[in-house]
């Protein structure tokens, strides 16, 4: 016949194993919960940044009202005006004769002025680092790459030419116009 102390020790050992198993499962669940909370927070941030987004295949606008339910039948929520969708004068138009430089944003206008002024004395193509120096900017990679991006966009629209990689000059018709009409 087993002793009472032996039975108690056996039950204590079983209870201890059960407690250890439950603690391991609780730690695993805590780790999963932490990951899920991070994902939840990231989705919340993304949702707040996006604001209103048109639903694919549906003409209504999804936004704060969508979380309250679908709009009433026959009622369409207001769509944002096209002027709200894009910032004014951030799109570079394709070059055509008579295009005024005032159609461009200030940054693009400044680039064209600098390159046109440099073309007059016949100094040739300019690098983006030299352009940054003309503007009084530090020739750090971030600022140079921002200028390079804008110069590439102007090149794609026919306002600049790139005779050698990384060197830009104003197109002849653009430089001759000196500020547009």
Image (spheres, rainbow, N blue to C red):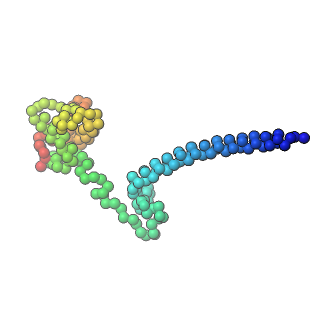
Q: Where is residue 66 in the image (x, y as percent from the top left)?
A: 45, 61
Residue 90 in view (yes/no): yes
For the view shown, which residue lies furthest in the front direction? Answer: 5
For the view shown, which residue lies furthest in the left direction? Answer: 121
What residue appears at the point 21 percent right and 48 percent down from the top-left corner? 105
Quarter of the image with the N terminus in it? top right
Q: Which of 50 and 34 is in front in this view?
A: 34
Q: In which quarter of the image is residue 17?
A: top right
Q: Which of 13 and 55 is in front in this view?
A: 13
Q: Nearer the viewer, residue 81 or 132?
A: 132
What residue appears at the point 27 percent right and 52 percent down from the top-left corner? 87
Q: Where is residue 25 in the image (x, y as percent from the top left)?
A: 64, 44
Q: In which quarter of the image is residue 12?
A: top right
On screen, residue 25 versus residue 46, left or right, reads right
Residue 156 in view (yes/no): no
Q: Nearer the viewer, residue 124 or 88?
A: 88
What residue appears at the point 62 percent right and 45 percent down from the top-left corner? 26
For the view shown, which residue lies furthest in the right direction? Answer: 1
What residue appears at the point 45 percent right and 66 percent down from the top-left corner? 71
For residue 56, above or below residue 154: below
Q: Position of residue 101 (x, y in %)?
A: 16, 47
């Amino acid at each position: 016949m087993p002793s009472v102390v032996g039975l108690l020790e056996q039950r204590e050992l079983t209870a201890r194993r059960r407690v250890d198993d439950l603690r391991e499962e609780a730690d695993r669940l805590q780790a999963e919960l932490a990951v899920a909370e991070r994902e939840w927070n990231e989705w919340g941030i993304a949702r707040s940044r996006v604001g209103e987004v048109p639903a694919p295949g549906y003409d209504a606008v999804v936004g704060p009202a969508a979380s309250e339910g679908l709009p009433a039948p026959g009622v369409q929520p207001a769509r944002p005006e096209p002027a709200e969708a894009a910032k004014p004068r951030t799109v570079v138009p394709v070059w055509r004769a008579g295009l005024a430089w005032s159609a461009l944003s200030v940054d693009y206008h400044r680039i064209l002025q600098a390159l046109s002024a440099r073309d007059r004395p016949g100094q040739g193509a300019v690098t983006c680092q030299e352009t940054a120096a003309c503007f009084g900017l530090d020739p750090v990679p971030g600022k140079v790459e921002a200028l390079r991006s804008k110069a590439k966009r102007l090149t794609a629209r026919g306002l600049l030419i790139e005779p050698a990689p990384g060197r830009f000059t104003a197109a002849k018709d653009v430089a001759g116009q000196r500020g547009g009409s």
